[in-house]
Amino acid sequence: MKLAVVGGGSTYTPELVAGLARERDRVDLRELTLQDIDPDRRETVGGLASRMLSAAGYDGKLSVTGDLDRALDGASFVLIQLRVGGQDARLSDETVPLACGCIGQETTGAGGLGKALRTVPVVLEIASRVRELAAADAWIVDFTNPVGIVTRALRDQGHRAIGLCNVAIGVQRLIARLLEVEPGRVLVDQVGLNHLTWVRAVHLDGRDILPELLSDHGDALAEQAGQPRAVLEELGAIPSYYLRYFYFHDRVLAEQRESVPRATTVAEIERKLLELYRDPSLTTKPKLLEQRGGAYYSEAATQLIASLSTGDGDAQVVDVRNEGTIAGLADDDVVELPAHIEAQGPAPLPQAPLAPELLGLVQHVAAYERLAVSAAVTGDRVQVHKALLAHPLIGQLPQADELVDLLLTSGAEYLPQFRQEALA
């Protein structure tokens, strides 16, 4: 099997490499190719990857390249983990919306839309090359945010793609630690849209124990969610950390206006990580990588790749077409939920209808995501405006009017699809 990692110069890559080395009995990896457009990052990260794989006894081939076509040629899996515009663009996503009194965040709200506009066209170009060059049955695994929107764009154009996020596996591992059991015994029934999910059941050896968990470990679960325990108890579910942007909008906005943007912190962490990666004696991922975010990313990615390879049918939380699984959403909406991972692809587990307080918000954001994909693909300012109006974190005409210009101006370098409209 050949795995191509697009964005292989990411500081996340050693996390992925550690997972591949650990799971080499399950993942028959014969060739790993790390592709990145930044020569310094790909050589630095590629050097560490080589040392890590050598230390783990990997006897396959490792290639490090800037050539996308070379990376994709014959690949069975293509993992996309890129950030168009780097941390500078993320800083824009987190700060530009604040001027309009809106949350600044890189995956949701106006910032998330800015990132989607930059990212979707690039990922679709990559996917078109995958179709031409990779194995006929190759899978695209998207870890690039905003995962739901990017996966929707890929599926809209007929690509064999699955979205992947590390939120569910993080909750699963926390619960396993709280219960002092092996993670494989725990299945979190996390459902909704990417970064807009709730865990409505937790199965331990097939039995739902969520009520007991909320009673016995409510404080720890609330801390993970970044919200008061009372919210979890009222909902009877564990909301994603990202729900705090909706449930505590004004509080979060005030915090963002007074604090150092996360992008600034991450940029400094990345600088230090790359310095560590250059150390020729380093053969393991450094402890500092845990501060970068993306915990358990390697486990989630390697589990998914292994199960798609073998058709084990184990249940994992992934981003897929709804296809009638969640009542009240369109079949072509991309949802995040548990699915049996089989060789032919994921088969979503049946889901009970969402409660009204969950469904209303999901429908609202699903409509926004549909418009966001349209805006990113067409380069139509009107669609950008409609997407901003549709999003519950914005939804007001004056803010939407201002944000269209701010997003398209701040991201102009990475938004070629809008230049033709400006020239028309």
Image (cartoon, grey):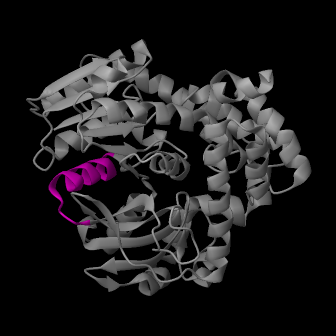
Residue extending furthest toward the front: 424
Q: Residue at x 43, y 82 (%)?
A: 210
Q: Position of residue 207 (x, y in %)?
A: 31, 86
Residue 53, quarter of the rendered image: top left
Q: Residue at x 79, y 43 (%)?
A: 382
Q: Is residue 117 above or below residue 194?
A: above
Residue 286 seen by the camera: no
Horizontal relation, residue 379 to residue 402: left or right: left
Q: Position of residue 277 (x, y in %)?
A: 35, 22
Q: Main secondary structure of the magenta part?
A: helix
Residue 361 seen by the camera: yes
Residue 248, quarter of the rendered image: bottom right
Q: Residue at x 42, y 53 (%)?
A: 166
Q: Is residue 264 above or below residue 111?
A: above
Q: Residue at x 56, y 80 (%)?
A: 354
What stretch of residues is rendered in magenta? 298-314
Residue extending furthest toward the right: 398
Say whether residue 173 is magenta: no
**In front here: 378 or 66?**
378
Residue extending furthest toward the top: 39
Which image quarter is the N terminus in?
A: top left
Which image quarter is the C terminus in?
A: top right
Q: Is residue 415 above or below residue 250?
A: above
Horizontal relation, residue 259 to residue 54: left or right: right
